[in-house]
Image (cartoon, helix red, strand yellow):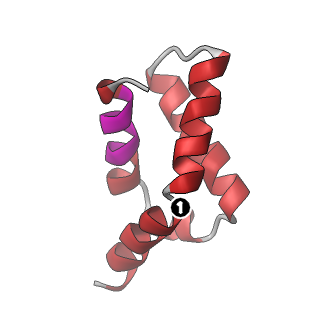
Amino acid sequence: MTPKIMRQLWSVVETAQAKTLSQLDDASLVQWLVKQIKTQALLDCHETDFLSDYIQSRLSLIRDIVDERLYF
């Protein structure tokens, strides 16, 4: 995954509606985030798989960020 795609991912996490993200289950959240990135960058199937795996491995951090935005 390129640094540009990684920055785009974390930008989406930071700017998306916290309430929307908090209402998604893990699988839906991964799919939603991948879809958002795919609208901004052309990804081949390997990059998409890697991005999905990366998001999955960072779900607890993403949830913490979302929860912090919801309650503060």
Above or below, 13 against 59 in this view is above
Q: Quadrant of residue 4?
A: top left
Residue 1 at what x, y percent from top left?
Answer: 44, 26
Where's the C terminus, which quadrant?
bottom left
Which class describes the residues within 10 Å of circle 1: few (<14), some (14-19), or many (20+)?
Answer: some
Name which residue type carries label 1: Leu
- For the point 41% across and 73% down, the residue is 64
- For the point 58% across and 32% down, the residue is 50
Q: Quadrant of residue 35?
A: top right
The residue that label 1 is drawn on is 59
- For the point 56% across and 22% down, the residue is 47
- For the point 67% across and 62% down, the residue is 26
Q: Which residues are magenta?
A: 5-11
Above or below, 53 against 41 in this view is below
Residue 2 at what x, y percent from top left?
Answer: 37, 23
Residue nearest the viewer, comparing 59 with 36? 59
